[in-house]
């Protein structure tokens, strides 16, 4: 289990462009061991002193007292005050910071993961992903996800049930699809009128006869010149 977690951390660091420096020397390992010894030696004594015996109370003590005091005692001021953080571009941070497991999609378009069967949905690009290599993600909130070539295909709860998008997102997606269809229909209609001479445009014009009476006539764009002289 430790080797698997170490591999997951190394993969995340490589994806983020962070160079990992392992503690291979006794001196480097000694520094980490001394830090662990300080925490292991101080924290249990403080918890016992304050009468803390359960996990919830211990976590509150860590957040409210111990961490701030520990950082005040042992934090070293950096030589360069500038921030070393850089902006991420084109990286799905949620997918990177997850536990990843490689799988092959079965013939029924499903993926097996820890006694669960995850059904993959059809997308606009592909109807199915049979025999495709995909990645199963375990997110920090306990949910699961399946991605293909860096793109998330679907989300699932801890029991393997699909998590559908929120109603607002679903309504927005439906509205976008309807608007796209309407635009395509209008463009097709205009293109047909312009390119196909067998479907001329019908218009209405008002015609004044010799007796002075007004009448409405339907005509096409090819025959409007004939009525212009009436």
Image (cartoon, rainbow, N blue to C red):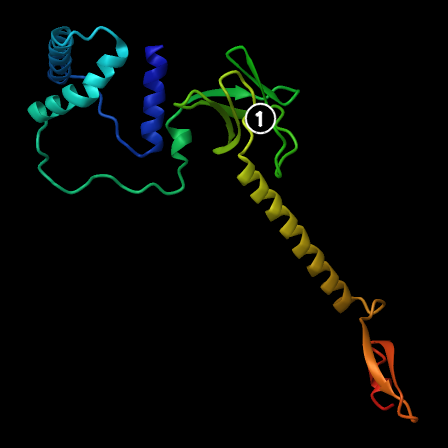
Q: Is residue 170 left or right of residue 102?
A: right
Res. 149 in view:
no
- In this rendering, would 229 be left or right of 17? right
**Residue name at image x 63 percent, y 51 percent:** 180
Q: In this orientation, which residue lies closer to the viewer: 37 or 69?
A: 69
Residue at (22, 13) in percent of width and height? 58
Number of numbered discs present?
Answer: 1
Q: Residue at x 11, y 40 (%)?
A: 80
Quadrant containing the C terminus is bottom right
Q: Quadrant of residue 141?
A: top left
Q: Is residue 37 left or right of residue 104?
A: left
Secondary structure at badge 1 equals loop
User: Which image quarter is the N terminus in?
Assistant: top left
| Residue 204 point in image, percent of width and height | 82, 76
Position of residue 19 in the picture relative to residue 130 (left or right): left
Up the image or down, 213 lies above or below 141; here it is below
> Is residue 85 depicted above or below 51 in this figure?
below
Residue 88 placement: quadrant: top left
Q: Which residue is mark 1?
A: 132
Local crowd at mark 1 within 10 Å, few (<14), some, or many (≥20)?
Answer: some
Question: Is residue 224 shown to the viewer in this render?
Answer: yes
Which residue is at the front of the view, 61 or 99?
61
- The picture places residue 84, in percent across and down from the top left corner, at 21, 39
Residue 220 percent across, percent down from the top left: 84, 75
Percent coordinates x, y for residue 215 in the rendering: 88, 82
């Amino acid at each position: 289990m430790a080797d698997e977690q170490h591999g997951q951390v190394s993969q995340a660091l490589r994806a983020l462009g962070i160079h990992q420096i392992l503690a291979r020397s006794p001196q480097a390992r000694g520094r980490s061991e001394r830090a662990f010894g300080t925490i292991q030696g101080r924290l249990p004594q403080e918890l016992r002193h304050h009468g803390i015996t359960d996990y919830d109370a211990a976590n509150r003590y860590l957040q409210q007292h111990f961490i701030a005091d520990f950082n005040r005692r042992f934090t070293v001021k950096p030589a360069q005050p500038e921030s070393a953080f850089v902006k991420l571009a084109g990286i799905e941070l949620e997918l990177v910071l997850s536990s990843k497991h490689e799988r092959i999609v079965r013939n029924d378009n499903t993926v097996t993961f820890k006694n669960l069967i995850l059904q993959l949905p059809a997308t606009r690009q592909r109807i199915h992903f049979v025999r495709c290599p995909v990645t199963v993600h375990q997110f920090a909130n306990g949910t699961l996800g399946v991605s293909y070539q860096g793109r998330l295909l679907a989300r699932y709860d801890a029991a393997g049930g699909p998590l559908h998008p929120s109603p607002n997102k679903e309504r927005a997606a439906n509205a976008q699809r309807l608007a796209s269809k309407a635009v395509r229909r209008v463009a097709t209609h205009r293109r047909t009128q312009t390119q196909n001479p067998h479907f001329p445009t019908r218009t209405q014009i008002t015609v004044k006869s010799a007796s002075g009476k007004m009448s409405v006539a339907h005509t096409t764009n090819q025959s409007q010149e004939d009525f212009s002289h009436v």
